[in-house]
């Protein structure tokens, strides 16, 4: 058996029940499947049983032979997923819609990979494993007050997100020191802002949440004129002394809309 590489943040999933839940998540809806970071193939072997077109992206060349034997050389991309233009790869394979992306995300690059996936229009569904602490920044499964942050706001603007399952350390080899969560994502057909506005919205969120516990005006005035901020807050029915972590998603959308002159869909 090939051991996990700590420098790549690898923890290999071995629990059959969790594997089954993940590999059946959107199996009925998807027209094609992409797996990122298959490693030794616990998910891969089950995903390959589905009839859809299927390819994988793997950085660790130690798994080259086994993955190519399972899927064929043409269906294995041996690159760092952060450096892969996923939209181009899907176009090459004429997979333009209804793509299901599956990944047991490496703990050290989970967030940047998620952002890359969100920005890829053909990806309609995702089943993603996160460190539980990161998953809570995407979906408030703990029902905590004042939990809104930039990652949650951005992700839930473009996807409906639900919890598929919680995963204890013992489900992996080697066991990590933390719990994990698998989240299911379904892209919204009509998000309040088109995907072309994502980069602009992302910059706004970074400004809004740069100091999470500061009053919203203090954060926003590092980028916007105070008069514009006050006007946008009033039109959004928000207090200038409120903290952004208390905002609802609809309030964040309204504030961005008024600050940037963007019409809500």
Image (cartoon, rainbow, N blue to C red):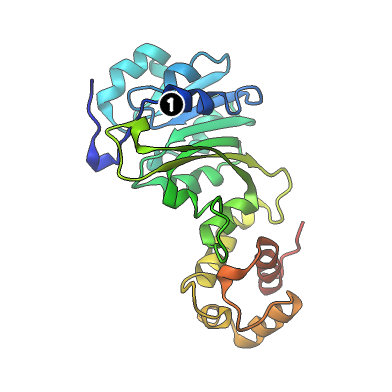
Per the image, the residue denoted by label 1 is: 56
* Of 146 and 104, the residue lying toward us: 146
Q: How many marks?
A: 1
The percent coordinates of residue 80 (x first, y second) are 35, 38
Q: Which residue occupies the foreground of this view, 87 or 19? A: 19
- For residue 43, which quarter of the picture? top left
The residue shown at (55%, 60%) is 144
Q: Where the N terminus falls, by quadrant?
A: top left
Q: Quadrant of residue 234?
A: bottom right
Q: Position of residue 180 (x, y in %)?
A: 42, 42
Horizontal side of 106 relative to 158 (left or right) equals: left
Side (left or right) of 62 relative to 36? left
| SS type, badge 1 | strand
**Quick check: 193 left or right of 72?**
right
The image shows residue 189, relative to residue 63, as above or below, that is below
Location of the C terminus by quadrant is bottom right
Residue 70 can be seen, yes or no: yes
Residue visible at 29% across and 41% down? 9
Q: Determine crowd level at label 1: few under 14, some 14-19, many 20+ residues with C-alpha closer than 10 A.
A: many
User: Percent x, y for residue 82?
Assistant: 39, 43
What residue appears at the point 58 percent right and 56 percent down from the top-left corner? 143
Q: Residue at x 60, y 35 (%)?
A: 125
208 lies left or right of 247? left
């Amino acid at each position: 058996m090939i051991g996990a590489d700590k420098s790549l943040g690898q923890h290999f999933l071995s629990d059959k029940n969790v594997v089954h839940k993940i590999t059946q998540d959107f199996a009925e809806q998807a027209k094609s499947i992409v797996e990122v970071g298959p490693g030794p193939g616990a998910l891969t072997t089950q995903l390959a049983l589905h009839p859809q077109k299927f390819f994988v992206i793997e950085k660790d060349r130690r798994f080259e032979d086994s993955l190519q034997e399972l899927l064929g050389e043409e269906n294995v991309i041996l690159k760092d997923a952060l450096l892969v233009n996923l939209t181009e790869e899907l176009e090459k394979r004429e997979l333009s819609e209804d793509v299901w992306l599956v990944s047991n995300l490496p703990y050290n690059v989970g967030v940047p990979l998620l952002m890359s996936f969100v920005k890829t229009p053909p990806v309609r569904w995702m089943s993603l494993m996160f460190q539980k602490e990161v998953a809570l920044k995407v979906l408030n499964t703990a029902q905590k007050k004042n939990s809104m942050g930039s990652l949650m706001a951005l992700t839930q603007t473009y996807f409906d997100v639900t919890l598929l399952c919680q995963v204890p350390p013992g489900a992996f080899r080697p066991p990590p020191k933390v719990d994990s969560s698998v989240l299911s994502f379904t892209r919204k057909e009509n998000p309040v802002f088109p995907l072309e506005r994502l980069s602009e919205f992302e910059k706004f969120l970074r400004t809004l949440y740069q100091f999470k516990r500061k009053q919203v005006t203090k954060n926003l005035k590092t980028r916007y004129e105070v008069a514009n901020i006050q006007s946008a807050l009033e039109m959004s029915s928000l207090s200038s002394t409120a903290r952004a972590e208390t905002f609802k998603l609809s309030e964040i959308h309204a504030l961005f809309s008024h600050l940037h002159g963007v019409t809500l869909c």
